[in-house]
Structure formats: C-alpha cells, structure tokens
Image (tube, rainbow, N blue to C red):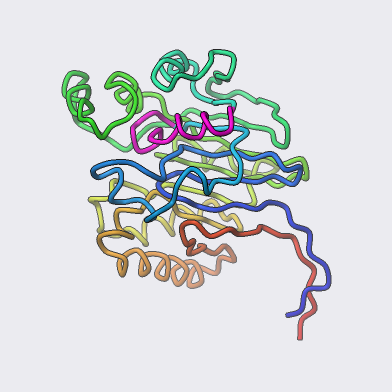
Amino acid sequence: MNNLVTSTALTFRWLNGQCFEFRFPNGKTLITDPWYQGCGKLGNRCLPNFTTDQLEGGDYIFLNHTHGDHTANVQDVYDRFHSTVITHSATAMEVARCFNVPLTSIYPVDYEGTYYFDGFILETHHATHHRQPSNYTETVERFKGPEFPGSPELNAMGSIFNMNFVLTTEQGLRIAFIGGNDDGMLKRMQGLQKPNIIIRNKMASSKVKINVAEDFAEWFSTADTQLLIPMHYETWLTEDPEFAQKMITDMNRILKDKGKVGQVAPMERGVWYTLNLSIATIN
C-alpha cells in the first residue's frame, strides 16, 4: 500500500514500566508514571543508559499510583521541566512532600472525573492494583528499603489508590490507559466511549506466566479496539525476552483466529513512534 495522505495524531514512546512520554500535536508533553532509572531492582529492569536529559518534554506528569516503580523519577522530571503533577487527591500532599513539588504544581484529581488540559482531556476511572496479600504494617516495612523513592507511606498508598484514565486529544483521538485490573473499563469503553488504542498493564503479576497471551487476547478481543500496547512487562524483557516476544506473537495469532482486526504492537523501549490516520492506495 502507498499512503496518499497521512495525518499525525500523536507521537509517543515507551520508556519502562508504565512510563510513557506523549507529545501532543500542539507540542505539550505528558509523562506517565516516571520510572526509567533507579537503584537495585528498580535500576536493573530499566532501559540501559537512559537519563532525564534524554526526555524531550514534561509539561505534565500523571501518576496511575504511587509505588516506587511508578514514581522513581518524579523528582528528576519535575526539577527539569517544572511539571504539573496529576495525582489522586488522597496522595497529593504526600507526593508534594516526598518530591519537593510546590503545592500549586500539584493537580489533584478524583475518580470518575473529567479534566481539561492544554492539548488533551483527561477522564479518570476507579481502578485496583493486582492483588497483594500483605497487610498495612507488612507493606510499609517492605518499602523501607533505600531503593524505593518517596516515603513508605506513599508507597503503601500505591496499593490502594489506582487510577485508570482515557485521554482525548484535541483532534478526537482516544487513548485508554489501564494500569491494573479492568475494574469496569470494558463496560465503559463502548459505543461513543470506545478508544482507538488501549495501553494496558499485563493481566497479573510478572510472576504469573501461564496463559498470559490467551487471557490478554481474550480481554482485548472483548474490547474490540484497533490497537493494543502492552506495558509493565520489563521483568520479562530483562529476564526472559523470548517469552515477552512470544506473548505478543501469540496474542496476534489468537486475535486473527478470532476474526478480530485489532492488533498488538511490539513496542521497543525508548523508540519514538507516531500514531497516524492515513488514506492509502491498495496495490
């Protein structure tokens, strides 16, 4: 096929975990869950040699939740770009305290809200984290290690306050970002609310490697959306890259067998991509 005309709706790249850098057509940028550097396990699973200096923008930061693998580089991004930090209202004060962000640079949001920013509309939805059996005391103790940014309490809040969202660009492109469990997102993403593209965390913990492609493909086929970008599988990319590649290959095979047009994109961390609307001739 040869493109007759192409309109670029969005440029973006996946950096690690749930960390994406989005650049909207008006030039504004959004960084989700900043984690591209760290120490200990938080560093071992990152894209090698990527630094804050390589970010191209950071007008906004959005936090899906406040575990260390979602906040590791909040301070770095804010210090460079003086970002507006969008976070759940229950975590707002602790985010400001832990990362030395001025209170007027914190933008607290709540579940089931609609918020208007320069370049995009943000719709927020209640979400939950993958199950973690530890109680409050055990969770706080777990996050007292030096590798975890923020306070133990802020990390513990990450197990409670989790927020899915849908972005709508000024041109009408809709992007769903699902950082944990579905929590009704399939029901919300119907009809006029259907997104063009879904970015979703894996269906369970990285420790679970049984029926990963089958379960993920079944969920996505029910969503019946055009494109899916899996995220937060950096552990597999680091420890078992063949499994990570096979997951995406198997998902696309299953979707094709189901007669679905939606496809799963095998993203490479750190690489810029464009999301386009094109008219092409068929040879």
Is 66 one of the magenta-colored residues? yes
Write the residue at 41% across / 41% down: 35
Write the residue at 44% across / 40% down: 179
Location of residue 135 in the rendering, given as x and y in whole percent from the top left corner? 19, 22
Q: Which of the 4 quarters of the picture holds residue 93?
A: top left
Magenta stretch: dominant secondary structure: helix
Write the residue at 45% across / 72% down: 253
Location of residue 144 in the rendering, given as x and y in whole percent from the top left corner? 21, 25
Location of residue 14 in the rendering, given as x and y in whole percent from the top left corner? 50, 52
Write the residue at 55% across / 69% down: 259
User: Which residue, as the protein is rendered here, is positioned at the far bottom?
Assistant: 283
Is 37 one of the magenta-colored residues? no
272 versus 58 height, above or below: below
Q: Give the extent of the magenta segment.
A: 65-83
Image position of 209 (left or right of 29): left
Where does the C terminus fall, quadrant-wise?
A: bottom right
Image position of 267 (left or right of 67): right
Image position of 160 (left or right of 33): left
Q: Which of the 4 quarters of the picture holds residue 69?
A: top left
Viewer-nearest residue: 20 or 39: 39
Where does the N terminus fall, quadrant-wise?
A: bottom right
Location of residue 118 in the rendering, given as x and y in whole percent from the top left corner? 73, 32
Viewer-nearest residue: 104 or 275: 104
